[in-house]
Image: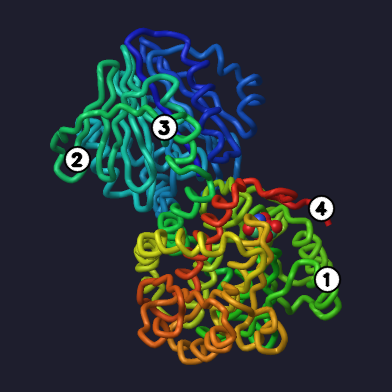
């Protein structure tokens, strides 16, 4: 997830230190490259950028000495185009009089770049931030140098979710536009600024103006004006005073990164779907999955990513008739290492792309001549480098140790591939982000209450049936990870084969149910409740299920295959609120690390 920051001041001054500080405050979002541009009073643009950490690139390129009346800094998290100096941001237009940087994803980047090259623009890299700058450049002259008109026209060309900031060397204003990605402006004494989020603004001013989708912010040293992209008309909105702590702002106003990341899920799922619709790599994935259907495709991961593989195997099997074998990273070597060969395909799934247990399996697959497909969140990671082809999860930086948004996007990605393999219209999935948002609204209060019930219990069970079995495992892992209670996830039919003996008075068992499985689940619930256990259902509204359960987390009605993804959210919330109720910091549970680079 990239971050942008721009500032405009009444006097020329050393802007380098301000830009470095802003970049540092955006760094928690994750990045692989950093750059700064300043515009002096005479319009000279100074642009410095490269791949690397802020401290190192800044020292090497001398950011601290940069001066100007306008400045832009950007932290890039690669999505389109590898991390490189050319792809680092900010970017110049063809003749170097416009400079700008973006945050987000322009999903028709490839098509627009080809168009710009055909039209004779100077395209230097493959990054979609550069595409934003050229998109404005293209309309700037046609509109007689009217920047607002040029941005409005560019907005119509640029598909996806993004925000960008841009300025012309001879126009002492900064322009910022928002479509899907975060953007907030700050108003100070002789200075205005704009950023992807609050933490980089608060050291400069606490008077802030939130820019909304479809709005252009025009910054001068004296203030910020908003314009509607649709009508071109001025929008009247007063700035607000932010008096919260900076640490809370970093977490988007949430007390923990985990809760912030849970609430980001509708947005990142939408961004991923946009990205997949426009990714040339999807065709390669589909081709690989379609080939040699008589051999199962291996889906390999660890922890939460393994649970996504389990769900992926259900999706590929049930929806597309494609046999898939979910395997743990280390298990792949032991169980499959000797029987895979050049005719086989394996999908390796990892948020970090650095999990050693997964990379060891990749090595074996490579040695045996098989095809390595990657699904990962951290671009530039080892898995990205070692894959024949990979798809990004497009979640931005996931800070909290428990994986949340990356799991949901792994599941969305597998569902997308299964739809495409089955010849179904993937546009049917566009309702998912809305359903995820509804699920959060509908279940957060009830999840808090359920967490209160669970808080004193040191052992409990999560049960799922069929397509919700992977969610029972994932929900149990999440709960164990951040509450330190023991929680076992199981296939509900298996419960009677031994673990049923754990049930005694009020013993909690949570049941995750997809549409069509309610009858079976009711009978499994009764095995528990007749022995005094406490049954908590996570399902869409179903009168008979409600009549049999003690508590009910009601997920919106949706297609059967959506239920595992939707039901994940209340399960994450239950774990989160139970963790907090136990006085544990869910972001940094004891003994655990976000990236496991050891065997
Ligand atoms: O980065 P990876 O997806 O490869 O990590 C694998 C597991 O370590 C990870 O999913 C872990 O289980 C999560 N922290 C659980 O929330």
For the residue pair 470 and 498, the one nearer the viewer reads as 498
Q: Which of marks 1 and 2 is nearer the N terminus?
A: 2
Labelled pair 3, 1 in contact (Cβ < 8 Å): no
Q: Can residue 382 be seen in this view?
A: yes
In the picture of the structure, the residue carrying the numbered disc 2 is 228
Do callouts 2 and 4 mark residues in contact (Cβ within 8 Å)? Answer: no
Here the colouring is rainbow
Task: Name the element at disc 2.
Answer: strand
Q: What element carries label 4?
A: loop
Whole-Å distance between the Cαs marked 1 and 2?
A: 57 Å
The answer to whether 308 is drawn above or below residue 583 in the figure is below
Q: Where is residue 172 in the image (x, y as percent from the top left)?
A: 29, 18
Residue at 36% across, 30% down = 166
Spatial CA distance of label 1 from label 4 is 16 Å
| Local SS, label 1 | helix
Kindly report which numbered mark, 1 or 4, lies closer to the viewer in this rendering. 4
Residue 6: name its quadrant.
Answer: top left
Left/right placement of residue 324 relative to residue 283 reads: right
SS of the residue at dot 3?
A: helix
> Which residue lies under the disc numbered 3?
198
Residues tagged 1 and 4 counted as in contact (Cβ below 8 A): no
The percent coordinates of residue 364 (x first, y second) are 82, 67
Q: Which of marks 2 and 4 is nearer the N terminus?
A: 2
Image position of 442 (left or right of 356): left
């Amino acid at each position: 997830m990239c971050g942008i920051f721009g500032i405009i001041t009444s006097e020329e001054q050393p802007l380098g230190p301000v830009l470095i500080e802003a970049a540092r405050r955006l760094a928690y979002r994750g990045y692989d490259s950093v750059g700064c541009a300043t515009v002096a009073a005479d319009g000279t643009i100074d642009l410095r950028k490269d791949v690397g950490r802020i401290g190192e690139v800044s020292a090497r390129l001398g950011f601290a000495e940069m001066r100007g009346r306008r400045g832009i800094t950007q932290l890039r998290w690669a999505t389109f185009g590898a991390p490189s100096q050319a792809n680092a941001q900010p970017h110049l237009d063809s003749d170097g009089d416009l400079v700008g940087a973006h945050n987000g994803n322009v999903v028709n980047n490839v098509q627009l770049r080809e168009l710009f090259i055909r039209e004779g623009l100077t395209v230097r890299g493959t990054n979609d931030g550069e595409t934003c700058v050229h998109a404005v450049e293209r309309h700037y002259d046609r509109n007689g140098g009217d920047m607002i008109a040029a941005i409005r026209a560019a907005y119509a060309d640029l598909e996806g979710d993004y925000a960008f900031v841009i300025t012309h060397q001879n126009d002492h204003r900064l322009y910022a536009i928002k479509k899907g990605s975060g953007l907030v402006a700050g108003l100070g004494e002789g200075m205005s600024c704009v950023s992807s989020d609050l933490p980089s603004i608060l050291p400069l001013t606490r008077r802030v103006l939130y820019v909304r989708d479809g709005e252009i912010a025009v910054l001068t040293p004296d203030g910020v004006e908003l314009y509607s992209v649709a009508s071109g008309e001025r929008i009247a909105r007063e700035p607000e005073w932010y008096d919260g702590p900076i640490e809370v702002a970093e977490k988007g106003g949430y007390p923990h990164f985990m809760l912030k990341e849970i609430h980001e899920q509708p947005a990142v799922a939408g961004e991923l779907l946009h990205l997949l619709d426009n990714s040339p790599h999807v065709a390669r994935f589909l081709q690989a999955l379609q080939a040699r259907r008589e051999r199962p495709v291996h889906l390999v991961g660890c922890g939460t990513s393994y649970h996504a593989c389990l769900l992926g195997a259900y999706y590929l099997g049930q929806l597309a008739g494609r046999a898939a074998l979910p395997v743990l990273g280390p298990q792949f070597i032991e169980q499959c290492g000797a029987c895979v060969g050049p005719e086989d395909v394996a999908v390796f799934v990892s948020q970090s792309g650095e999990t050693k247990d997964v990379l060891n399996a990749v090595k074996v697959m490579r040695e045996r001549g098989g095809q390595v497909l990657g699904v990962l969140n951290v671009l530039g990671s080892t898995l990205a480098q070692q894959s024949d082809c990979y798809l990004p999860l497009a979640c931005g930086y996931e800070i909290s140790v428990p994986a949340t948004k990356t799991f949901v996007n792994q599941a969305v990605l597998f569902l997308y591939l299964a739809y495409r393999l089955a010849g179904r219209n993937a546009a049917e999935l566009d309702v998912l982000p809305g359903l995820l948002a509804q699920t959060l609204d509908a279940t957060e209060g009830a999840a808090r209450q359920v967490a209160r019930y669970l808080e004193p219990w040191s052992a409990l069970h999560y049960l799922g049936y069929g397509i919700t079995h992977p969610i029972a495992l994932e929900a149990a892992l999440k709960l164990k990870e951040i509450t330190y209670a023991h929680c076992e996830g199981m296939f509900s039919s298996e419960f009677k084969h031994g673990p049923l003996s754990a049930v005694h008075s009020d013993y909690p068992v949570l049941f995750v149910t997809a549409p069509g499985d309610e009858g079976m689940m009711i009978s499994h619930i009764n095995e528990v409740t007749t022995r005094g256990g406490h049954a908590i259902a996570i399902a869409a509204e179903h009168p008979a299920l409600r009549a049999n359960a003690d508590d009910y987390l009601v997920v919106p009605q949706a297609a059967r295959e959506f239920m595992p993804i939707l039901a994940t959210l209340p399960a994450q919330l239950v774990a989160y609120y139970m963790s907090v109720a136990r006085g544990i910091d869910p972001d940094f549970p004891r003994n655990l690390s976000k990236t496991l680079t050891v065997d």
